[in-house]
Amino acid sequence: MSSPGKEAAPQAAKPNGAAEDIRNYAYARIDFEEVKRLYPLPEYCESRGIHLKRQGGLWIGRCPLHIEDTPSFVVYLKENDPHVHCYGCNFHGDIVDLEQAFGGGSKSDAVARLGKIPVTYLLVPTRTIAKPARKQFHPELVRPGSDDLKDISIRRSINVECLQIAVERGFLWVSQLKSHACWVLTDQARKTYLARRLDGGVWEQLDSKPKAWLLPGSSAKWPIGIEESAPYPAIALCEGGPDFLSAFAHAWAGWGRGQGCAGLYVICQCQNGLGRSATLLRRETSSNLCPRRRCRL
């Protein structure tokens, strides 16, 4: 056994079979149970000048922490809890506590003075730190006027009557964003706002200079119109705002000047190979709409 206080603590070895790079571990800690096994209390006490006499299963001597005539310092060698107790000063602890009482410092300092430092490496699963939810921006929405609908109609080649259907169903609005008049698509859930400028220009504040702007905090996975579509027998799956409005024109023209629109709702494109064009489907269950729940507008 090494002499306490004289031998410098060696570098703890990494566990065999474990990853060599300590960065693969969150941290390493001292294995105090292994310390107790490595340094038996009777031998340690003798090295500290504490003379013990064996009495049955106990070791008894004079306490080194106070002056006494009658030995009251008892070493208990329990298999899972070797410790000492002084019935004179009531000191109680294991070998690390005793070394700490002799030399001061922390428990780690006490173990370092003993000699070899047994270490347990604790593996911690990789954790993904969730990004804080981005606060959603809710623009001030205004019902489109006749001039607004005419502008959209001319630019998108969609009949005003078809655009009016989208207005009546609460999908099509106008707003003022970044000093530009724009038309905005959303639904009653207000989880997604998709904006385009009425003059057809790009959004200069965005790096990619897109024409369509998904407003801050809006969910790109939310299918606009999904909740409103529940009672309708047919839906249109499409991608983007222009196709969204074009689906109304398709139904209005193909099903008898608007009468067919009473049974149509427009939903986003689904990520399941349906393609980009508007598609009319017969509804059976809500799961048929979006089997993977991976929709985006």
Image (cartoon, rainbow, N blue to C red):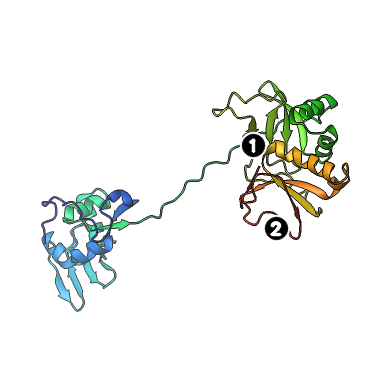
Q: Position of residue 39 (x, y in %)?
A: 18, 63
Q: Position of residue 60 (x, y in %)?
A: 18, 70
Q: Nearer the viewer, residue 129 or 82?
A: 129
Q: Is there any visible trace of residue 140 in the rendered image? A: no
Residue at the far top in the pictured view: 179
Q: Position of residue 61 (x, y in %)?
A: 17, 67
- Where residue 278 sits, quadrant-wise, is top right
Which residue: 64% across, 32% down?
213
Which residue: 70% across, 54% down?
289
Q: Nearer the viewer, residue 165 or 20?
A: 165
Q: Position of residue 83 (x, y in %)?
A: 26, 66
Q: Is residue 91 left or right of residue 137?
A: left
Asked if 244 appears above or below 206 in the picture, the reply is below
Locate the C terminus and report the quarter of the image it occupies.
top right
Residue at the far front in the pictured view: 254
Q: Which residue is mark 2?
A: 288
SS class, disc 2: helix
SS class, disc 1: loop
Q: How many neighbours does mark 2 have within 10 angstroms: few (below 14), some (14-19), or many (20 or more)?
A: few
C-alpha separation, residue under disc 2 versus residue under disc 1: 29 Å
Residues at discs 2 and 1 in contact (Cβ within 8 Å): no
Locate the N terminus and report the quarter of the image it occupies.
bottom left
Among numbered discs 2 and 1, the one appearing first in the sequence: 1
The mark total stands at 2
Residue 31's disc number: none
User: What is the three-letter code of the residue carrying label 2?
Assistant: Asn
Q: Which residue is mark 1?
A: 136
